[in-house]
Amino acid sequence: MTVSRRQFLKSAVAGSTVVATACIATDADARGNMEMPEGALGLLFDSTLCVGCKACVTACKTANGKPLATPPELPYLDKTRTLSPDALNVIKIFKDGKATAKDRAEDGFAFMKHSCMHCVDPACVSACPVNAMKKQPDTGVVTYDKDACIGCRYCVFACPYDIPRFDYGSAAPEIHKCQLCDHLWKDGGFSACADVCPTGATLFGPVIKLKAEVARRKALKAGEATKFPRRHVEGQEFTKEQPMGEYIDHVYGEKEQGGAQMLMMSGVPFDKLGMPDLPEQSYASVSETIQHSLYQWLLGPAVALGGLMAVTYRTVRSEDENDED
Amino acid sequence: MSEHAPLGGKLVTPVTIFLAALAAIAGVFLLIRFVFGIGAVANINDGYTWGIWVVYDVVIGTGLACGGYAMAILVYILNKGQYHPLVRPALLASVFGYSLGGFAVIVDLGRWWNFWHILSPGYSHLDSVMVEVAICIALYIAVLWIELSPAFLERLGLKDAKRKLGRVLFVFIALGILLPSMHQSSLGSLLIIIGNQLDARWQTVLLPLLFLLSAISLGFSVVIFEATAASEGFRRPRETHILSGLSVALIAVLGLYLGIRFVDLAMRGELGSVFAADFLSVMFWIEISLFVLPIVLLLPSARRVNPRMLFISAVSMMLASALYRVDAFLVAYNPGDEFSYFPAIPEMFITVGMIAFEVLAYILLVRRFPILQGTHGQPRAAMSRPLPAE
Ligand code: SF4
Ligand code: SF4
Ligand code: SF4
């Protein structure tokens, strides 16, 4: 028994070491975060400009063929606070204590947009087994194709921002998420939420331009008078001149998970607004690195199979000799 | 010596009728699920989108079905021929565990008619951990049926076919060791992408290794459990002498698992958090205690021949690995405060019904096909008693 025990322990430790080495992947194998495409399109949401009118919530529903919860002229009555197959975009309200001042963490309140971040290195895309979730190579928009989808909901499980929604009540369910209104582009349109926003709180455009606008806002001092671009960052529409709000020193979506194509500015820390605290290294890259090093181009498994076959062949053979009459 | 023989006996007994009834109830709920959608029978939601059908039927079920895998490692890789009598029954349990896991996947897939996409080069996304799990499980189900087919060929008297298959069987046996090693570890890898939605006490890049070890220990404990239960249930002679050797392997795997778990926690600086006064720490320590108990029970070699000790250890080990997997997929997973999940009654009935079907098929097959090792000279009547109700 002692011999077999030693033998067993040896093999067990050896096997584990192989897997462990693969798990703690070497830098050479690490795939690193994906890069944002040059022509990336996205949104900039500025919580200090948002007045909570929810025009974007209603516009999003109209643009995507979802039933409206309120008469279209009374969007602010919409009580939707969580995403659903019928709501790809919601405005959440943060309140603290007496909630007397806007954009203040203590005794204040603020509004927050919740919709797909169009991650640079999306977990939903890495997870999806059938390429139904795809990051478009030119615009970086993360799109969904129901004809490919098998309904496994790994995207729902994986998304760190809790975005994809699934029809549990349907025999032919689909995943629902913001696709940046890419269906409106062919008629010259763009994201409905940005299109209707009266204050410029939600702004559409190429991410490079949006980043320049973020830098411009960060360079201004709180209270300084300025005009904010409305609807499309490249359009020539601006708000009236108004005093700048006060921002915290954190632009959400710049670094999180290797970046996102929706950027967010706020006067209140983002964890208070319900956004998760995420590392810069994307979970997709961690997962794929481990998977790749475990199965480097299926070479590892092939070699392993050869070895296993040699060993089992030996055993089966000697067994046969005993078995055969 | 090691001749396999059908057990014989009646097929229609109170136990088999009860199992069939459970399976029939599940059938009705399944019909409702396919006509009205998953939400009509299950409580899963966009926070807890994977409920018991995934976590029990697939993640734990295929783990429990690793008996065939664990025995194959022992017999064919470590060349321990004396365990051979346990291989076939273990394979049969594996075949059902995996086939039903595969069926549960279809039940759980919202757009199940597209299932073939995952195996088709036109759609398949090779970076997705799930593709690897799906391909390996699908292949392994086929391999299991082939590995088991000598039992059927024997019964049907197809000696020639059996001999021909015997010549290439080593290929399938090797695959039968490789494939579970791949997908059982990948079941753990599935969780890496959820990042900090999984509590730091569970989230680690070593998840694949821990899942692999928990699969092997599940496999061994199931073999001990089944052999003990089968010798009780079918009044067969005990196989204690064989099983006690297995417990050595069990202790080794458990020790390795525990060592890795704690070293990993220490290296990530999370050792302190397992002493935090919260619910998850309690779950963590229940898990660890269940892993430690079999080691304590079986360390003195005298106890390893005690069938009761073996049985208790096997159960503890199974609970430990099952709880580890439930914790990792559901309990320690935090999708936000707005969500909660507890399986609905019909959802549970579907799972229970599938297990009932599995046990039923096992009983029917060992009674009619040469799966268990023959017991020479024992009167048939003594072996044909129905399973005791307790
Ligand atoms: S926010 Fe979620 S759904 Fe949107 S791209 Fe990122 S991972 Fe995908
Ligand atoms: S549910 Fe559909 S889109 Fe989401 S991961 Fe599964 S196959 Fe992909
Ligand atoms: S881009 Fe379109 S789909 Fe996305 S949140 Fe805005 S309106 Fe809704």
Image: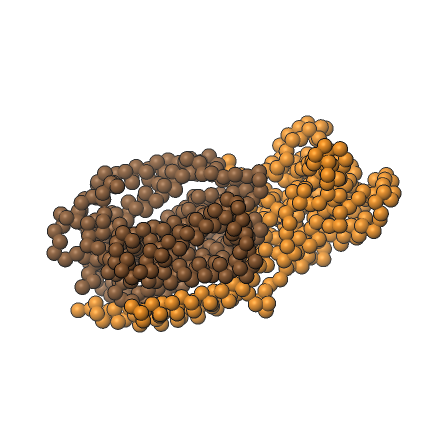
Please give left or right for residue B254 compared with residue B149 in the image: right
- For the C terminus of chain B, the quadrant is top left
How many numbered callouts?
A: 0
Chain A display color = orange
Residue A140 lies, in percent from the top left, at 67, 53
Residue B304 lies, in percent from the top left, at 28, 58
Asked where in the image residue A111 lies, by quadrant, the reply is: top right
Please give left or right for residue B37 compared with residue B223 in the image: right
Residue B118 vertical position relative to residue B345 in the rendered view, above or below:
below
Asked whether the viewer can see residue A308, the reply is yes
Residue B111 lies, in percent from the top left, at 49, 44
Asked whether the viewer can see residue B243, the reply is no
Residue B263 vertical position relative to residue A3 in the rendered view, above or below:
above
User: Residue at image x 27%, y 52%?
Assistant: B308
- For the N terminus of chain B, the quadrant is bottom left
Residue B162 vs residue B56, the one in the foreground: B56
Residue A37 vs residue B206, the one in the foreground: B206
Residue B334 vertical position relative to residue B144 in the rendered view, above or below:
above
User: Residue at image x 19%, y 54%?
Assistant: B237
Instruction: Kindly indicate which chain is depicted in brown in the rendered structure.
Output: B
Residue B191 lies, in percent from the top left, at 52, 53
The colour scheme applied to this rendered structure is by chain
User: Residue at image x 66%, y 48%?
Assistant: A117
User: Residue at image x 59%, y 64%?
Assistant: A30
